[in-house]
Amino acid sequence: MPAYVIADVRDAWDADALEEYRRRNTDAVANHGGRFVVRGGEHEVLDGEWDSKRFVVMEFPDAAAARAWWKSDEYEAIKPIRRGASTTNIVLVDGV
């Protein structure tokens, strides 16, 4: 069953650092069988309140692959870049 990692970027203040993070994360996700389904783009709140700057959705073959990406050495190396350049909530969700 596919699994999705959803990133909700609440604030971002260092565009250069985030560009480096995106470049390196592209390979890290692919190396664990993942792909980007949503990577920014326009969004519209249809109901309720949602104050996000950007959304990212990654699809992995299963939750184990997503967790392997999350815990991988290559991703561990770039987590500090993201954390130092943005405030982001990240969740793992099983698909159907």
Image (cartoon, helix red, strand yellow):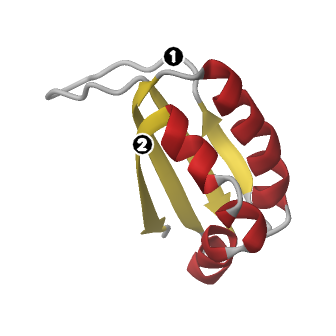
Marking on residue 51: none
Instruction: Judge by depth and name the residue closer to the eye, 4 or 83.
Output: 83
50 lies left or right of 55:
left
| Position of residue 66 measured from the top left corner of the image (x, y, whole percent) | 62, 71
Secondary element type, mark 1: loop
If you read the primary sequence from the N terminus, does the residue marked by circle 1 or circle 2 appear first?
Answer: 1
Q: Quadrant of residue 1?
A: bottom right
Q: Quadrant of residue 23?
A: top right
Amino acid at the residue labelled 1: Glu
The answer to whether residue 78 is above or below residue 60 is: above
Determine crowd level at label 2: few under 14, some 14-19, many 20+ residues with C-alpha closer than 10 A.
some
Instruction: Identify which residue is drawn at 42% across, 42% down.
Output: 88
Determine crowd level at label 1: few under 14, some 14-19, many 20+ residues with C-alpha closer than 10 A.
few
Instruction: Judge by depth and name the residue closer to the eye, 3 or 81.
Output: 81
Secondary element type, mark 2: strand
| Position of residue 81 measured from the top left corner of the image (x, y, whole percent) | 62, 44
Instruction: Identify which residue is drawn at 62% across, 83% down.
Output: 64
How many numbered circles are shown?
2
Amino acid at the residue labelled 2: Thr
Identify residue for label 2: 88
Query: Disc 1 vs disc 2: which is toward the camera?
Result: 2
The answer to whether residue 56 is above or below residue 51 is: below
The answer to whether residue 34 is above or below residue 54 is: below
| Position of residue 3 measured from the top left corner of the image (x, y, whole percent) | 56, 68
58 lies left or right of 19:
left
Q: Quadrant of residue 18?
A: top right
Identify residue for label 1: 42
